[in-house]
Image: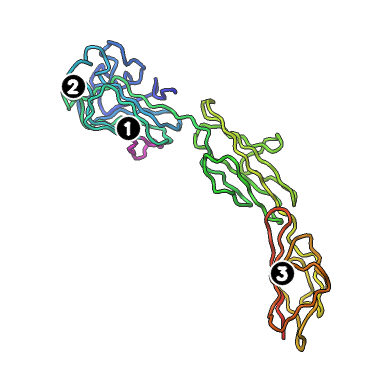
């Protein structure tokens, strides 16, 4: 992995010449040159680095003076700093936030990982300096490492619902679209701010949040290819969009007749059954599956005993995909 701080612009709360903070990001950490370090004699003290843009990071390294020949033999890590922490912020005038830290350190090298974090600015903040002289902070090299990732953090959907619920380690999903939904859109969000995300349908590139048309009773596979910012990792997610076939009734004939007259997108009706013990469902036309008061009816006309019923409920379901409608006939007796 690449040390993101190497050669980047840096500043410090203070420093003692010639030990300016740039010397702690110059890559010289094992040299016998004692000037290749940052030295600060006013604590708490800090040095900070502007990465130039946001990066996903998860590792930091501090190389203390004890990492250099001659200083590494002093007992109890005398030339190593004791208490310091890694901080970050993402706006130039923001608030510094702690990411990780060490206390009572005696080691020449601090090399630690932490949960992935997007950062723009990083800071080494020292509260207790060298074990031999706690008022002095001296760092040979300050390093922060990128964590390239091809993970997504979410797939946002317009027009349907993603199933199962998104998790970055799950790469296959379904979006069920109702019959009346003619198009949908996906917006995949990458974990790595420098990753590239390419969506394709049948080999053609589709831009995030752009509308994708789909025919009723069909499905369509959307491939999402994520490549980490440094190109080292790639991951492919697949979303299968399914648009339901029609769930509507096409016709409904009864004796006596319905009020109002039947229409596929009208769901509530009255039927005058005064003085009757039964009514007839003469015919129901539908490409969808349906039940009548929970029962499957296959022959017509169907005589419906209404002595114990106050309404008739017809529930339709698409034969392809997921969609349904409910029609209700209120019996006036």
| Marked residue nearer the N-terminal end (3 or 1) | 1
Residue visible at 25% across and 12% down?
69
Relative to 119, is 315 above or below?
A: below
Q: Residue 95: where, in percent of width, then height? A: 34, 40
Q: Which residues are magenta?
A: 88-99
| Disc 3 to disc 1, C-alpha distance | 67 Å
Is residue 190 on the magenta stretch?
no
Q: Nearer the viewer, mark 3 or mark 1?
A: 3
Q: Element at badge 3?
A: loop
Counting residues from the start of the chain, the first of labels 1 and 2 encountered is 2
The C terminus sits in image quarter: bottom right
**Quadrant of the rendered structure where residue 330 is?**
bottom right
Q: Residue at x 25, y 26 (%)?
A: 14
Instruction: Look at mark 2 in the image and give the residue it sits on.
Output: 78
Q: Is residue 269 left or right of residue 210?
A: right
Q: Is residue 70 visible?
A: yes
Density class for disc 3 (Cα within 10 Å; few <14, some 14-19, many ≥20) is few
Asked if residue 93 is among those painted magenta in the image, a careful observer would answer: yes
Residue extending farthest to the bottom is 275
Q: CA distance from mark 3 to mark 2?
A: 85 Å
Give 222 or 300, whichever is nearer the viewer. 300
Please give the residue where the numbered disc 3 appears in the rendered image: 295
The disc placed on residue 86 is 1
State which mark lies toward you, 3 or 2.
Answer: 3
Q: Secondary structure at mark 1?
A: strand
Query: How busy is the neighbourhood of tag 2: few (under 14 within 10 Å), some, or many (20 plus)?
Result: many
Q: From what the image shows, is residue 289 above or below residue 224? A: below
């Amino acid at each position: 992995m690449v040390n993101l701080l190497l050669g980047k612009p840096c500043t410090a709360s203070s420093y003692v010449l010639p030990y300016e903070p740039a010397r702690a990001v110059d890559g010289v950490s094992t040299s016998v040159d004692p000037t290749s370090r940052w030295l600060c004699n006013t604590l708490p003290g800090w040095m900070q680095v502007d990465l130039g843009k946001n990066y996903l990071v998860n590792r930091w390294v501090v190389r203390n003076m004890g990492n250099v020949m001659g200083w590494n033999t002093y007992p109890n890590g005398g030339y190593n700093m004791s208490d310091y922490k890694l901080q970050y912020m993402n706006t130039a005038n923001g608030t510094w936030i702690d990411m990780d830290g060490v206390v009572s350190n005696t080691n020449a090298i601090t090399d630690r990982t932490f949960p992935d974090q997007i950062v723009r600015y990083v800071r080494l903040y020292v509260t207790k300096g060298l074990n031999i002289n706690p008022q002095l902070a001296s760092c040979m090299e300050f390093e922060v490492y990128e964590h390239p990732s091809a993970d997504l953090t979410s797939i946002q959907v317009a027009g349907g619902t993603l199933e199962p619920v998104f998790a970055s380690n799950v790469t296959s999903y379904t979006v069920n679209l109702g019959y009346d939904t003619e198009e949908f859109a996906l917006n995949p969000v990458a974990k790595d701010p420098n990753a590239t995300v390419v969506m394709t349908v049948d080999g053609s590139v589709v831009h995030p949040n752009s509308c994708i048309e789909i025919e009723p009773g069909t499905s369509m596979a959307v491939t999402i290819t994520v490549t980490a910012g440094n190109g080292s990792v790639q991951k492919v997610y697949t979303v299968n969009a399914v648009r339901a076939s029609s769930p509507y009734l096409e016709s409904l004939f009864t004796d006596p007749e319905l009020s109002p007259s039947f229409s596929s997108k009208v769901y509530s009706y009255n039927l005058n059954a005064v003085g009757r013990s039964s009514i007839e469902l003469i015919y129901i036309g539908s490409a969808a599956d349906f039940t009548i008061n929970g029962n499957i009816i296959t022959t017509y006309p169907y005589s419906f005993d209404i002595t114990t019923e106050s309404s008739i409920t017809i529930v339709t379901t698409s034969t392809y995909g997921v969609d349904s409608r409910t029609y209700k006939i209120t019996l006036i007796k």
